Image: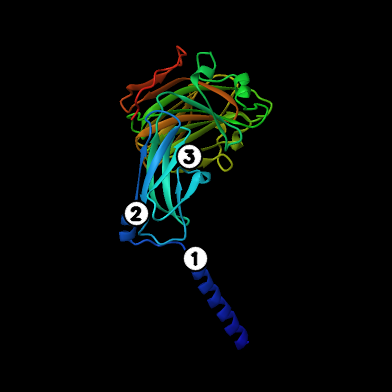
């Protein structure tokens, strides 16, 4: 019995040593972390696509491999090397991103990247890894923001298969994301491939965001929200109040006062909640549909209820480019 205990002890010890030997997670001292530098510059302002030149220095860090990731999307991670100090990448969609510098699998530095655009930006994904942008000249002629099914097909997006349609407005809104009001109208057209149509409203701040889903009545289990740091999953929480008639025009309003949110759908209060971690200044509003969606009458008010942004998509014409900081 003693031999068995000794053998087990030896095996356990060897296992610990092997684990320690295989664990090559870099540990950085404050001085090493301070020596790491990470910055960027954009090649254009207010336009897409946009090449970004990243400048970095990882000479103080000991690791097997180094990577630069342009956003949350791990598929946009590229390997970088000691001895080099620059890496370029292209952003094809506007947004407020967080670029990451990694040593092996550990994030050692993060910086915000604000890729602005002078106008609304429309894009479709099919599959999600493939992005197709549509200029204003291809948008629907109706007095709202949308796109016709035949135009999607001409752009190699097949509406009979799953796809995502997204609208972005990315700029410095000059508004506090913890104290403002937002109103918008939306609807979707029925598609055979989309039994549960839904919309995701995204408001991105400097340090946090809102992700708000509404969907067809009966499909509420698929909904979910993130408001600041607080998550509301439809699988584990009753979100049926966010189910609505997606094939008719709907109006959603929400107000944030000192991190307390109130939602109103078609004039009826439906939900209230709160969070604690500030999302900072608003840098982006965007809409994501899992099918053929459209929006209208976008309004944002600041904490004094002063109207700071208004868009009714009339007249429907292209805008001249302007510099957006």
Outermost residue to the top: 315
Quarter holding the N terminus is bottom right
Q: Under tag 1, what secondary structure? A: loop
In front of the other: 61 or 223:
61
Q: Is residue 207 above or below residue 320?
A: below
- Residue position marked by numbered label 3 in the rendering: 226
Label 1 vs label 3, nearer the camera: 1
Query: Crowding near pointer 2: few (<14 within 10 Å), some, many (20+)?
Result: some
Marks 2 and 1: which is nearer the front? 2
Q: Which residue is mark 2?
A: 36
Residue 233, horizontal then vertical, whole percent: 54, 41
> How many labels sit on residues?
3
Residue beneath the point at 54% across and 22% down: 294
Who's the residue at 40% across and 56% down the image?
82
Q: Which residue is mark 1?
A: 23
Q: Name the residue at 47% across, 30% down.
A: 286
Image quadrant in which you'd find residue 318:
top left
Q: Position of residue 50 (x, y in %)?
A: 43, 33
The one of 140 and 78 positioned closer to us in this rendering: 78
Q: Nearer the viewer, residue 246 or 73?
A: 73
């Amino acid at each position: 019995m003693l031999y068995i205990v000794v053998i087990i002890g030896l095996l356990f010890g060897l296992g610990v040593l092997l684990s320690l030997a295989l664990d090559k997670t870099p540990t950085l001292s404050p001085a090493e972390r301070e020596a790491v530098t990470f910055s960027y510059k954009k090649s254009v302002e207010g336009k897409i696509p946009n090449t970004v030149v990243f400048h970095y220095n990882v000479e103080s860090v000991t690791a097997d491999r180094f990577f630069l990731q342009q956003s949350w999307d791990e598929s946009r991670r590229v390997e970088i090397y000691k001895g080099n100090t620059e890496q370029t990448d292209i952003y094809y969609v506007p947004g407020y991103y967080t670029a990451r510098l990694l040593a092996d699998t550990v994030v050692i530095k993060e910086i915000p990247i604000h890729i602005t655009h002078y106008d609304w930006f429309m894009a479709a994904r099919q599959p999600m890894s493939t992005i197709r942008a549509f200029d204003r000249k291809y948008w629907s002629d109706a007095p709202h923001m949308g796109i016709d099914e035949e135009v999607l097909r001409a752009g190699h997006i097949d509406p009979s298969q799953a796809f995502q349609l997204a609208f972005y407005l990315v700029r410095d809104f000059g508004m506090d994301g913890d104290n403002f009001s937002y109103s918008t109208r939306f609807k979707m057209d029925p598609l055979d491939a989309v039994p549960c149509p839904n919309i995701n409203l995204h408001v991105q701040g400097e340090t946090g965001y809102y992700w708000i889903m509404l969907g067809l009545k009966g499909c509420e289990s698929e909904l979910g929200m993130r408001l600041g740091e607080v998550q509301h999953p439809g699988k584990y929480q009753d979100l049926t109040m966010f189910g609505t008639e997606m094939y008719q025009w709907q109006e959603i309003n929400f107000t944030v006062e000192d991190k307390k949110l109130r939602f109103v759908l078609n004039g009826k209060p439906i939900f209230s909640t709160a969070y604690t971690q500030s999302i900072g200044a608003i840098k982006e509003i965007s809409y994501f549909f899992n099918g053929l969606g459209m929006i209208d009458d976008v309004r944002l008010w600041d904490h004094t209820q002063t109207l700071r942004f208004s868009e009714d998509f009339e007249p429907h014409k292209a805008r001249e480019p302007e510099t957006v900081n």
